[in-house]
Amino acid sequence: MPPGGEPTEADVEAALAALSEPGRLRAAEHRVARFAPELQHILASALQEGGWFDEAHESHLRKLAETEDVEGRMEGLRTLLAEETRLGMLVGVAVGWELARELEGGPCV
């Protein structure tokens, strides 16, 4: 990666490949566990600011809870949980990326 610059696609692909190596994330897992409360607060704020869990989300959840068909309700809840998990992970990655840039002393744009 160029100093102070944005990573190229090749840089990101190489970094992702390195992260998939066995045991590579153990130290990061320990750091995350140490700062989990602060990170959870930042993630929750980012999700709220992004409008991800607004009234439409609550309305959808309420509709699912009131669904009489048990299988339909379960399928809807599974889908909602999967979507929320994916969204939380993606926003979490964005938070982590910005945290890394902040720690490097670079501009967070």
Image (cartoon, rainbow, N blue to C red):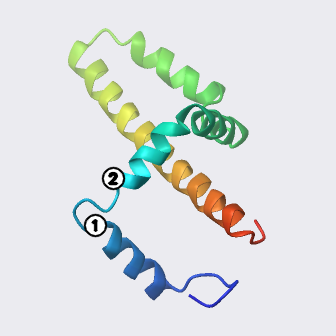
Instruction: Residue 107: give x, y in percent of width and height.
Output: 78, 70
Residue in the image at 68% along x and 69% along y: 104
Residue that label 1 marks: 20
Instruction: Residue 100: give x, y in percent of width and height.
Output: 61, 63
- Above or below, 106 against 94 in this view is below
Crowd class of label 2 (few under 14; some 14 to 19; many from 20; radius 10 Å): few
Indicate the secondary structure of the residue bearing disc 1.
Answer: loop
Between 68 and 3, the residue placed more toward the observer is 3
- Above or below, 49 against 16 in this view is above
Between 20 and 51, the residue placed more toward the observer is 20
Residue in the image at 27% along x and 28% along y: 75
Q: Amino acid at mark 2?
A: Arg
Between 99 and 65, the residue placed more toward the observer is 99
- Above or below, 86 against 103 in this view is above
Residue in the image at 25% along x and 68% along y: 21
Instruction: Residue 105: give x, y in percent of width and height.
Output: 75, 69
Instruction: Residue 68: give x, y in percent of width and height.
Output: 31, 8
Indicate the secondary structure of the residue bearing disc 2.
Answer: helix
